[in-house]
Image (spheres, rainbow, N blue to C red):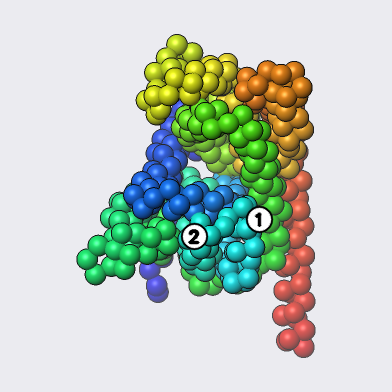
Amino acid sequence: MAHQRKRKIEKGLVDGELSHSIWKLAGPMMIAGALHDLFSMVDLFFVGKLGHIEVAALAIAGTTMSVLMMLVQGIAVGTMVLIAHFTGEKNYEMSDNVLGQTFIWSLIGASIMLPVSFFLVEPILKLFGATGNILVYAADYLRINFNYSLVIFLFVGISNALQGSGDARTPLYALVIGNVLNIILDPLYIMGYGPFPALGVAGSAVATVLTRGVGIIYLFIHLLFGHSTIHFKIKYLKPIPFLMKRIVSIGFFASLQALIREISFLFLMRLVTSFGAVTLAAYGIGSRLRSFIMVPGFGFASAAAVLVGQNLGAKKPKRAEKAAWRALRYYEFLLTPIVIIFLFFAPTLVGFFNNNKEVITIGSSFLRYLAITFPFLAFSLVFSQAMNGAGDTRTPTIINAIGQLIFRIPFAYFCALVLGLGYKGIWLGINASDIVQGIGMTMVFRSGHWKKAFARHKNKLLKDDRQMATSLLDTETSSLN
């Protein structure tokens, strides 16, 4: 008889001390978030040595890449949520099946990106205003990423699947391997040292694909032979329509959340740019620091999502709710000294990136405005992900749309242009949207609507599962007759 490989059961997520569970998940996820930032910074560092045209090409290609990442994130979030639910109820076979459907969706997603790569790359880039060499370099970069997008789909999908099962360390190890290799390969392929061809901006894409590929091999070995909660076998690659449907129905709104953020960002950038290069530089520095502050937030928010999903699966809704509030408390605790630093040492922080007096003045005002609404940002981040973890991705999407499109953009334009407040009007628009989203997310989370959404989602799964079982039985019976 074949040896049965044992599963690694992540203890303490649905029982035991909540604080330990939160830090066990949030710690690796925070480091992973920082490593994602490092990945793009390394690319920018080496491409920056080629010149400003290449940097502009990388920037515009990065904006276009967000289209691909929306698809990737949709599949990944749907995967994480379902695996968290099934793992919480100890239905590991179904978790494995969800992983199989993620592979299928990754193949479908990658096949969609191929015609985009062949026919739409240049028209999309021209839409963003790319011309001349910027267009050429950016198109080369995108074609490589789109042609080999399966690597990106699988890397993010498997990482989220493991996180949903409660394993945040293995995806982190894969990222560490990828980052180390990226630092080595980037200069070789971009500059063309030794026997390597000098590919310029495209070399950055080649390094990304190769390093993510090595990361996937590491993750695959773990799923096939390692002490893992979820296992991969060929038999799980069989399409299961109701699971594929649930991944998409949950993931669709996660993708929509990303789209809303991008649209809001583009409108805001147009307004900031209208106030000149100095304001744009100040906004760029402030935005980079804001993103840095959000890295630990995403760690705690992702931990909340997994714990909410697993505890709802384990039929422990009170513990699920408690996990979200505890994760929020830890993030708020971390934010307190940061708020003080932003308020009192804003000029020093901005001056570290740029010594222009005007940039320091404008950037400092931006940081101080941001500091006031950081607590609301924490509410929005943690509770939106907690609701996502329950499978309720629609509600956070609606609140994000209200905050970022209906509130942020019109209010920023009104304050900046109609009231004549200039760049301070833009900061007020960002403040207003953070407050609206923070209060909105808190109110909806407290209402417990996400628990009802989880119940509806589970009922649909059970109904679809029964229908599939009946269909299979009818097929077997007819074949016997």
Quadrant of the frame with the N terminus: bottom left
Examine the rendered structure and indicate whether residue 104 appears above or below residue 278.
below
Q: Earlier in the sequence, mark 2 or mark 1?
A: 1
Q: Tell me: 262 left or right of 23.
A: right
Residue picked out by circle 2: 133
Give how far across and how far down residue 358 sits, in percent. 49, 21
Q: Nearer the viewer, residue 285 or 435?
A: 285
Q: Tell me: 229 left or right of 49.
A: right
Does residue 296 appear in the picture of this structure? no
Give how far across and how far down residue 175 sits, in percent. 38, 50
- Dot 1 crowding, Cα within 10 Å, few <14, some 14–19, many 20+: few
Secondary structure at badge 1 equals helix
Q: Tell me: 224 left or right of 239.
A: left
Question: Which amino acid type is marked by label 2?
Answer: Asn
Examine the rendered structure and indicate whether residue 56 appears above or below residue 206.
above
Quadrant of the frame with the C terminus: bottom right
Q: Nearer the viewer, mark 2 or mark 1?
A: 2
Q: Nearer the viewer, residue 113 or 169?
A: 113
Does residue 281 appear in the picture of this structure? yes
Quadrant of the rendered structure where residue 346 is?
top left
Q: Answer whether labels 2 and 1 touch (C-beta < 8 Å).
A: no
Q: Residue at x 73, y 86 (%)?
A: 479
